Image: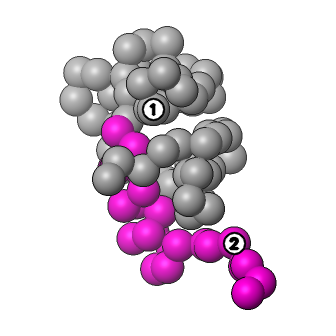
Amino acid sequence: MIPKLESVEYVAGYTIHVRFEDGIEGHVDLTQELWGEVFEPLKDIEMFRQLRLYKELNTVTWPSGADLAPEFLYDQVVQQNGTADRPVTGG
């Protein structure tokens, strides 16, 4: 199952906050991911800050044409935070 992105926000530096429809959310530090022809322009912090959620394609995009797969972001939330933040539900 491909995780469905619900929101994305710029935090600081090269860190974004993502939230998925299943309640998983957290910060993702993309500092080490900004290499190669597509991502190199995002080292300009003003360009990086222009991220947006492209709901139709379920991805994070930038005006430069760069984008990130939701699966990658989901895995990063889990890896970088140790455990994903899940909403508390009563039962």
* Relative to 56, residue 32 above or below: below
Q: Residues within 10 Å of mark 2 (few under 14, many from 20)?
A: few
Residue extending furthest left?
Answer: 36
Image coordinates for residue 47, horizontal then vertical, percent: 55, 20
What stretch of residues is rendered in magenta? 69-91
Residue name at image x 53 percent, y 43 percent: 5
Left or right of residue 1: residue 47: right
Q: How many marks?
A: 2
Q: Is residue 27 visible?
A: no
Query: Is the C terminus in the top left, top right, bottom left or bottom right quadrant?
Result: bottom right
Residue 45 lies, in percent from the top left, at 57, 29
Can I make out residue 83 in this image? Answer: yes
Give the number of the disc on residue 87.
2
Which quadrant of the view contains residue 43? top left
Rounded to the nearest angstrom, the CA distance separating label 1 from label 2 is 21 Å
Give the camera-side residue of 23 and 8.
23
Pointer 1 residue: 58
Q: What residue is drawn where x is 47% and y is 63%? A: 77
Residue visible at 22% across and 29% down? 36
Between residue 62 and residue 36, name the one nearer to us: 62
Q: Amino acid under label 2?
A: Pro
Residue under the point 45% across and 32% down: 58
Q: Position of residue 67 (x, y in %)?
A: 38, 27
* Residue 67 drawn in magenta: no
10 lies above or below 41: below
Front in this rendered view, residue 43 or 51 = 51
- Residue at the limit of the structure toward the right, as seen here: 90
| Rendering coords of residue 39 (x, y %) | 33, 28
Going by the numbered disc 1, the residue's amino acid type is Asn
